[in-house]
Image (cartoon, grey):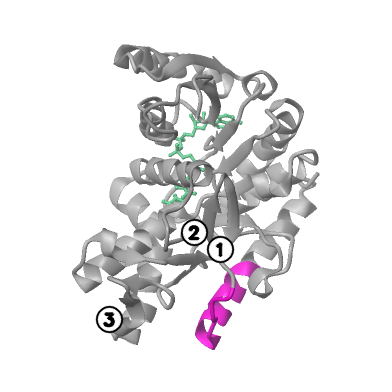
Amino acid sequence: MSNTPVKVAVTGAAGAICYNLLFRIAAGELLGPEQPVELRLLEITPALKALEGVVMELDDCAFPLLSKVEIGDDANTVFDGVNLAMLVGARPRSKGMERSDLLEANGAIFTVQGRALNDHAADDVKVLVTGNPANTNALIAMSNAPDIPNRRFNALTRLDHNRAVAQLAQKTGVSVNAISQMTIWGNHSATQYPDVFHALVDGRPAAEVVDDQDWVENDFLPTVQKRGAAIIDARGASSAASAANATIEHMRDWVRGTPANDWVSMSVPSDGSYGIAEGVITSYPCTVTDGEYSIVEGLEIDAFSREKIDASVAELNSEREAVHGMGLLG
Ligand code: NAD
Ligand code: LMR
């Protein structure tokens, strides 16, 4: 870390997630208490006035680490020289929609932003997509940014990971700190596969501690898979504070590293690991050292898990086909 501010781009900056995200970044929760940050905030033109209000509030916090805030509606200008890009801006789903229903509404956003990152971001840029459908939007951005290495494009499944950790901790009556090695495989969608079979509770295999396959299959899995919809149903709006928290945690760990003896779930470009062919951005167990992630290799996948992973990857492949058909892949 240095005294030179890290330039952090955030899109959808006047939206609900960002109202939780920006203040935490400016307070040092992303890059630590020594690292100044410059915020580059992108919005669509009609939302710029609201964004000015958010910037007034950022000013009014007098955050010592916040060196500068720039706002705009042109990705080419806002992304100039950015080191980190958090692509949140996109329409959320409403009641009754699946996240994939947003492909048409949101996909095009990520062609423009992928190209702008390609042409203007710093050489070390890392890009994290939160806007839904996050995995396929990340694929669109990646494919429109041929000069940026593919592995610099991630999508957010950390919220699902955190949801799974919380459910398992509640079931086993331990604190969330006692849960490790949780994995989300696949898509940030209802087909995702939250895998307890490699997770540990106080260092013991979770499946052994839980000892209740019915709970795993008929309670844990659907609860985590459908949590986003349950929140929309209860709140009348999609998750915002928890999504902001997960977005910070994913990027923080990608930059600053994962804890020893644990891993996190990150959606990254498939590289053939676990028999998932290249071509999609899918969730894997990952560790991070020196700003580079590695997929945790060598986990045993039983027939139950295999079927679930394959179903989610099949959905990702069909989303890829759909956006290919819409001409969104570069
Ligand atoms: P919101 O509607 O409150 O805010 C979205 C903002 O994005 C709006 O201010 C809008 O003007 C802006 N925007 C739209 N198009 C843009 C563009 N081209 N460039 C820049 N900004 C643009 O929505 P929200 O609740 O903040 O959610 C944002 C997205 O995050 C949604 O797609 C939602 O489904 C998704 N989400 C993902 C996860 C996840 O875990 N991956 C979790 C929660 C929400
Ligand atoms: C979530 O998981 O909460 C978000 O992706 C919002 C949604 O549409 O479910």
**Marks 1/3: CA distance?**
23 Å
| Left or right: 220, with 174 as reference point | right
Badge 1 marks a residue whose secondary structure is: strand
The residue pinned by badge 2 equals 265
The reply to whether dot 2 and dot 1 touch (C-beta < 8 Å) is yes
Q: Nearer the viewer, residue 168 or 223?
A: 168
Spatial distance from mark 3 to mark 2, Cα to Cα? 22 Å
The residue carrying mark 3 is 209
The part of the image, by quadrant, that contains residue 317 is bottom right
Disc marking residue 49: none
Can residue 306 be found in the magenta stretch? yes
Q: Specify whether 140 is left or right of 246.
A: right
How far apart in space, not on screen, are marks 2 and 1 (Cα)? 6 Å
Give the SS element for disc 2.
strand
Task: Tell me residue 301's x, y (percent).
Answer: 55, 81
Q: Residue furthest left?
A: 173
Q: Which residue is mark 1?
A: 284
In the rendered structure, which disc, 1 or 3, sits on the residue that comes first in sequence?
3
Q: Quadrant of residue 237?
A: top left
Considering the numbered disc 3 on the image, is that residue within a helix, a strand or a loop? helix
Of label 2 and label 1, which has the lower sequence position? 2
Left or right of residue 109, residue 18 in this image: left
Q: Is the magenta region chiefly helix, strand or loop?
A: helix
Please report the residue visible at 65 percent of the width from the left and 20 percent of the height from the top.
74
Question: Magenta stretch?
Answer: 298-314
The kind of residue on which mark 3 rests is Val
